[in-house]
Image: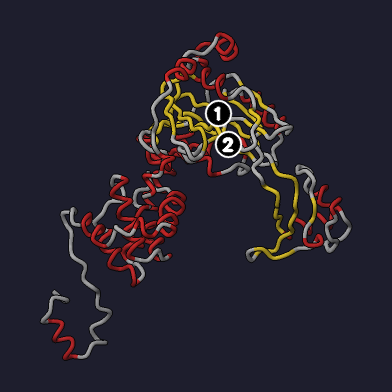
Amino acid sequence: MPSTKRPSVEMSIDESLLVSLRNPNPATCEFFGDAIARHRVDVCWVENRFSSFTPLRNVTLGGLVSNFLVEHEVRQEKQENGLIYSDLHGRRKDDFAQTVCAAVYDIDHRHKFGAVVEQREREGYVGATHTTFNHGKRLTLEEADKCIDWLRDNAGSSITPFTDELARQFLPELRDVRALDGGKWTRVDGKTVYRFEHAPEDRLRAIYFLDENIPLAEVGQDGCRAIYHHIGRERYGDDYDRKCENPARIQWTPSCRPDAPHELEVHRGNLIPWRPAWEFIKADVEKRRLEDAARAAQRLKDPPKDVAEISHYLQFISPDSPRAEWLSVVLGVHNETKGSEDGRALVHSWSAGAPRLYNPEDLDANIWDWATANERDGSRYTMASIVHHAMKHPQFKRYRPRLKTVRSIHPDEYQAMLDSELLK
């Protein structure tokens, strides 16, 4: 089962670590100010991506920064010593997050470290900015139209192939740029692009501590993500990794490769408020919830023929049910549809009926694709599982196949149907 993977298990707390996290040192209190240094947050710590997590609840911002965010650690791999800026109970899944205490943005190469630091100093919000470990990106694809316009303006002709020198001028923010495919456009996944190879690309991470923890029970998963993007887009446009929106995402503490350049800046000031952002976007979030629920209900009423029976029963099961029940239904649909795309679309439509909990990335990667790769483990959930949950509904009705039209049926066959249960 996906929900019983080892990395999701909550581990016991290291009391010695808690002492230093709950009691910021005098230098930290002087740097931030006593009130900010002693601001309480709830986070989780992981040793590596395979390990279980340790909850660090009711710790201080100053203690967290002085223990995890003051210098880079030299490592061969980045995936060691990570923080999750939310309070998880039981498992390392977004659905198990109770609160979120920080907004973290992985920013792409279009933003220089110095420029981001200057911007943050002007804003005056508490947190940290640091270069992250090499994310390993070595290939950049650029749209052909953009490249052709640049070549026309800078190389004298739109048909001039990219030389390595021109490629370096076109992408000055990247290191060791080299044009591929003879400097000419090519087709990738149906798109016309130019391809450029370069040195591994580093990104920046900007951490903003919130003035109070965001309660997921109040704003919902979708509301929390909307707050995250509202704060992020005001500062970085769309130039950040959207996956950082997930409450249970691991954010690796500052690290770098041996002999690699690295930078880190800790920012003092005020804690960034999230409630003004929530009040600004709340009406749109609630409107989108109603629209998503309506679309989901409509799709369930008109499903593909091969999943019509399953769709019928899903109308009697709330997607807002406990995760264990929701998971058994999803795996039941997967088993009955043999992991088909129609089955995937159906569980998405059904799950979207609970927009506060609906997480399409989690459903695809951690549930549906997992079940496809581990078919034997998920096969114990069947149509019986789906019907079992549907029968709990007070208005439950058994599935009856719909007849297309009466006119297309022979009179004798029609009379036989009238005498059967099909038309009753």
* Residue at 40% in and 47% down: 287
Q: Is residue 14 left or right of residue 413?
A: right
Q: Is residue 98 left or right of residue 155?
A: left
Can residue 169 be seen by looking at this rendering? yes
SS at badge 1: strand
* Residue at 66% in and 30% down: 74
Alpha carbon separation for disc pair 2 and 1: 9 Å
Give yes or no for contact between labels 2 and 1 (Cβ–Cβ under 8 Å).
Answer: yes
Q: Quadrant of the C terminus?
A: bottom left
Colour setup of the view = secondary structure
Disc 1 packing (10 Å; few <14; some 14–19; many ≥20): many
**Quarter of the view holding residue 379:** bottom left
Q: Nearer the viewer, residue 287 or 31?
A: 31
- Image location of residue 321, percent across then percent down: 28, 47
* Residue picked out by circle 2: 105
- Image location of residue 63, percent across then percent down: 51, 18
Amino acid, disc 1: Tyr
**Quarter of the view holding residue 279:** top left
Amino acid, disc 2: Tyr
* Residue at 73% in and 64% down: 186
Can residue 276 be seen by looking at this rendering? no
- Image location of residue 231, percent across then percent down: 54, 35
SS at badge 2: strand
Residue 208's disc number: 1
Q: Is residue 313 left or right of residue 283?
A: left
